[in-house]
Amino acid sequence: DQQVKQNSPSLSVQEGRISILNCDYTNSMFDYFLWYKKYPAEGPTFLISISSIKDKNEDGRFTVFLNKSAKHLSLHIVPSQPGDSAVYFCAASEKGGSEKLVFGKGTKLTVNP
Amino acid sequence: EPEVTQTPSHQVTQMGQEVILRCVPISNHLYFYWYRQILGQKVEFLVSFYNNEISEKSEIFDDQFSVERPDGSNFTLKIRSTKLEDSAMYFCASSEVGQRFSTDTQYFGPGTRLTVL
């Protein structure tokens, strides 16, 4: 069951550059998407979300883009900082369908000084 | 900033023993959840709880599992007879109004690492 896929297990970028994390989904009923950041030995921390009625949402250095026709979303971090090094999870929910969040496997981002 | 707390941070138990994992959700939240993450795998939904009832559960959440809100602040997950494959990180989460009819955000606790020997 791979309804939410993060195909890159890891990503390494230089401090100050852009980090782009990608997420694909297969369930066309998903209509709300969230990104969580997770440090080792901590729980997932909410970062940013986007509803399917939008194609972009921005919060400071973080921007999420949604391409519904491609069933693809991406998280852009600009500029990347060493403190951004963590595992990033994409999650999706189905309004009117379910209480659960469906998670991807995560992408480990390393930002090098 | 309000946060979800969980105790203990690490629980080691023998196969067949009962364990209770505890969570204190954010105080004004009405929906509570348990998820688990087996090492190297995805975070998986177990159960959601609202108004003192299970509102949804996954196929993982079988008769070995139960949830309870024993008082006004705690939310617990009980595993009656633990198996080796129950070893995982268990995350509690809470949200204000739930996911089914809104675009709500679930806030997660730091997790309890359960090790079954």
Image: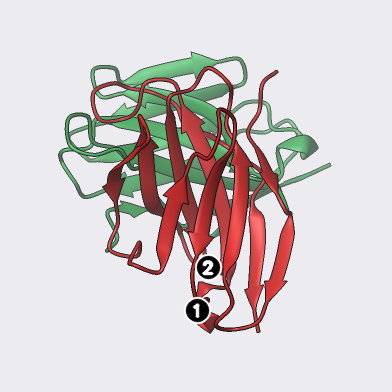
Chain colours: A green, B red
Q: Which residue is mark 2?
A: B38
Subunit of label 1: B
Q: How many numbered dots are placed on residues in this image?
A: 2
Q: Is residue A102 visible?
A: no
Subunit of label 2: B
State the image quarter where residue B65 is shown. Answer: bottom left
The residue shown at (59%, 42%) is A44
Q: What quarter of the picture does the C terminus of chain B occupy? A: bottom right
Gap between marks 1 and 2 measured at Cα:
9 Å
The residue shown at (57%, 32%) is B25
Tell me: residue A52, above or below residue B69: above
Image position, residue B58 (x, y; %): 30, 57
The residue shown at (46%, 57%) is A105
Query: Which class describes the residues within 10 Å of circle 1: few (<14), some (14-19), or many (20+)?
Result: few
Secondary structure type for disc 1: helix
Tell me: residue B93, above or below residue A39: above
Tag in front: 1 or 2? 1
Residue projecting furthest to the front: B70
Sequence-earlier tag: 1 or 2: 2
Asked whether, in this view, residue B35 is left or right of residue A88, the answer is left
The amino acid type found where label 2 is placed reads: Ile
Secondary structure type for disc 2: loop
The residue shown at (42%, 52%) is A104
Residue toward you, B92 or A107: B92
Asked whether, in this view, residue B8 is left or right of residue A60, the answer is right
Q: Which residue is mark 1?
A: B85
Q: Are marks 1 and 2 in contact (CB under 8 Å)?
A: yes
Residue toward you, B102 or B114: B114
Asked whether, in this view, residue A74 is left or right of residue B108, the answer is left
State the image quarter where residue A73 is shown. Answer: top left
Residue projecting furthest to the right: A113
Q: Is residue A84 visible?
A: yes
